[in-house]
């Protein structure tokens, strides 16, 4: 196993672990938050957050990827002066764009909320607006360190961001909900309070990365002094390259994530204007979907997102070296590692939906709907994990247009499907989930076609999909049976859910090795790989 390949997987694992930890913290703090706020306030918050996510995509979401691509390319050639100028140019660009987009969202909050069909989300939008500026600057900082080949600063900043978000969201949400009760707007005020945590979390992450950058600055200056590069790029040239890099990444990520906002707007407007459902009723349904289903399914998808961020600078390096074999190996490893984790996670969420939701969101009014939705989690996790990692791979091999075209075509089909699902079949929130799954599946198919075209890549099926699905299916049946039988003995759902999850992990691990789905070299690439290999040998599984 090459050092380069192993390092890329290690860095991806670090970011993946941080991403999972961030999602777990998010799940934990939303338990009391949803209990206190209720599904209606969370529906307003989720709508505002979807709009914020769209503006974030337009202003800064593509910056980490673009900056990491450019910086990694400069560092691979030891052009430290150009790398520094790239960072400075990107920072100026981020500040300007961040200010413009923040202003648009702040002053247009009321109109945007009305267009979305959730008028009471306007206060949350106004609070979220300054966060766009902070995230623009933060995106450049994260991209710079990722371009250096280290995901550690980004990983730590994400965890700190989520912890600060957790604390402020709960405290500010409770406070503003009490204030809102005095004027009869507790749900809209409460939603605005929750969004304050997002702003403070972003500021916390930015301060941390600024501190790390100060520590690294000395080494950066030494590298710049040793740099003998003759072709020093101008800021105008850097800005041009930055824009040309950002634009396709921006298009692909924006279109890829457009579905959430479109789903919210289409669902709200069809429920209100076509099916004549009361705003509070359909907002509550949307709150269930966004604060429970989407929240839980994004935990395993975080792995694909992390590996996507890690694979880009690594693929850039291998591509610049002209090493096509290394590129193919990294593509195979990234996809396999993602699927080996995503498949059992999706199966676990589907099979243990009832016990998990009863622990996290024990609301008797919404419980049955939540459980039925969660049965579809496997398909959501599978298609969005695969489409996320393949998007990153295509960007890493400089095929920027492919994800844009693929996501655009899939989104157009998705919009037709969701309208039919809501109006013709009256699928409600289930229609939203099913149409999302169709969208993700279409992106997967289109991305695979692009990988075959540009890399002559043929997707291996047995070890990447078939065997993990077999192992995960057996795991799901055993874990579900374990929980069910133990509940007959003693009614202790929390305890038996934890036991069932532990049993699931052990069973899946044993089956993976027994079915020869992974070998020793691949295990070493995983987090704590040496310890896993040692345990496997002691159990005579290898």
Image (cartoon, rainbow, N blue to C red):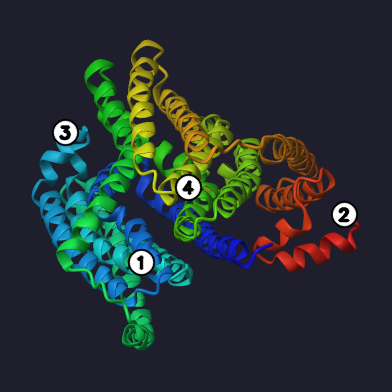
The residue that label 3 is drawn on is 115
Q: Earlier in the sequence, mark 3 or mark 2?
A: 3
Q: Earlier in the sequence, mark 1 or mark 3?
A: 1
Q: Tell whether 243 sits left or right of 300.
A: left
Q: Tell whether 537 sits left or right of 372.
A: right
For residue 358, say whether it is visible.
Answer: yes
Q: CA distance from mark 1 to mark 2?
A: 43 Å
**Of the two numbered discs 3 and 4 in the rendering, the one whose residue sits closer to the viewer:** 4
Position of residue 130 measured from the top left corner of the image (x, y, whole percent): 19, 60
Closer-to-camera residue (22/398): 398
In what quadrant of the picture does the C terminus appear?
bottom right
Residue found farthest to the top: 424
Under tag 1, what secondary structure? helix
Q: Which mark is residue 393?
A: 4
- Residue drawn at 72 percent across, 36 percent down: 462
Q: Residues within 10 Å of mark 4 (few under 14, many from 20)?
A: many
The residue that label 2 is drawn on is 541
Position of residue 215 measured from the top left corner of the image (x, y, whole percent): 37, 86
For residue 163, say whether it is visible.
Answer: no
Under tag 2, what secondary structure? loop
Q: Earlier in the sequence, mark 1 or mark 2?
A: 1
Q: CA distance from mark 1 to mark 3?
A: 40 Å
Closer-to-camera residue (226/28): 226
Q: Are marks 3 and 2 in contact (CB under 8 Å)?
A: no
The residue that label 1 is drawn on is 71
Q: CA distance from mark 4 to mark 2?
A: 33 Å
**Of the two numbered discs 4 and 2 in the rendering, the one whose residue sits closer to the viewer:** 4
Residue found farthest to the right: 540
Q: Tell whether 116 sits left or right of 446.
A: left
Q: CA distance from mark 4 to mark 1?
A: 17 Å
**Of the two numbered discs 1 and 3 in the rendering, the one whose residue sits closer to the viewer:** 1
**Of the two numbered discs 3 and 2 in the rendering, the one whose residue sits closer to the viewer:** 2
């Amino acid at each position: 196993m090459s050092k380069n390949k192993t390092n890329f997987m290690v860095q991806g694992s670090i970011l993946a672990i941080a991403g999972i930890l961030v999602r777990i913290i998010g799940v934990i703090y939303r338990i009391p938050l949803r209990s206190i706020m209720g599904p209606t306030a969370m529906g307003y918050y989720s709508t505002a957050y979807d709009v914020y996510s769209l503006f974030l995509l337009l202003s800064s979401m593509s910056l980490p990827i673009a900056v990491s691509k450019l910086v990694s390319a400069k560092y691979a050639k030891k052009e430290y002066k150009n790398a520094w100028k790239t960072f400075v140019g990107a920072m100026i660009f981020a500040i300007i764009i961040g200010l413009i987009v923040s202003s648009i969202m702040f002053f247009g909050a009321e109109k945007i909320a009305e267009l979305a069909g959730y008028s009471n989300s306007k206060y949350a939008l106004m609070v979220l607006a300054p966060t766009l500026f902070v995230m623009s600057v933060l995106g450049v900082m994260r991209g710079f360190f990722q371009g250096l080949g280290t995901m550690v600063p980004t990983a730590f900043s994400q965890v700190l961001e989520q912890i600060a978000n957790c604390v402020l969201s709960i405290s500010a949400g409770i406070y503003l909900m009490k204030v809102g009760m005095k004027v009869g707007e507790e749900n809209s005020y409460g939603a605005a309070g929750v969004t304050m945590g997002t702003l403070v979390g972003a500021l916390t992450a930015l301060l941390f990365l600024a501190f790390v950058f100060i520590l690294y600055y000395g080494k950066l200056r030494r590298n710049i002094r040793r740099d003998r590069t003759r072709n020093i790029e101008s800021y105008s040239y850097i800005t041009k390259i930055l824009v040309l890099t950002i634009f396709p990444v921006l298009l692909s990520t924006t279109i890829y994530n457009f579905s959430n906002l479109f789903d919210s707007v289409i669902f709200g407007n069809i429920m209100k204007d076509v099916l004549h459902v009361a705003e509070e009723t359909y907002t509550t349904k949307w709150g269930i979907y966004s604060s429970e289903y989407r929240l839980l399914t994004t935990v395993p998808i975080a792995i694909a997102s992390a590996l996507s961020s890690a694979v880009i600078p690594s693929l850039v390096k291998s591509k610049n070296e002209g090493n096509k074999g290394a590129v193919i190996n990294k593509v195979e490893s990234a996809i396999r590692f993602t699927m080996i984790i995503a498949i059992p996670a999706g199966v676990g969420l589907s099979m243990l939906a009832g016990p998990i939701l009863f622990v996290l969101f024990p609301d008797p009014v919404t419980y049955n709907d939540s459980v039925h939705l969660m049965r579809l989690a496997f398909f959501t996790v599978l298609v969005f994990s695969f489409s996320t990692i393949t998007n990153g791979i295509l960007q890493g091999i400089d095929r920027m247009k492919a994800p844009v075209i693929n996501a655009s075509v899939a989104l157009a089909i998705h919009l037709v499907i969701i309208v039919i699902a809501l109006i013709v079949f009256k699928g409600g929130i289930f229609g939203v989930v099913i149409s999302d799954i169709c969208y993700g599946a279409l992106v997967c198919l289109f991305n695979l076609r692009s990988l075959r075209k540009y890399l002559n890549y043929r997707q291996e099926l047995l070890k990447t999909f078939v065997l993990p699905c077999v192992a995960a299916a057996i795991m799901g049946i055993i874990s579900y049976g374990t929980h069910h039988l133990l509940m007959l003995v003693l009614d202790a759902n929390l305890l038996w859910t934890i036991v069932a999850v532990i049993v699931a992990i052990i069973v899946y691990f044993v089956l993976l090795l027994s079915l020869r789905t992974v070998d020793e070299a691949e295990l070493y690439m995983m987090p704590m790989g040496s310890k896993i290999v040692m345990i496997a040998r002691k159990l005579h599984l290898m």
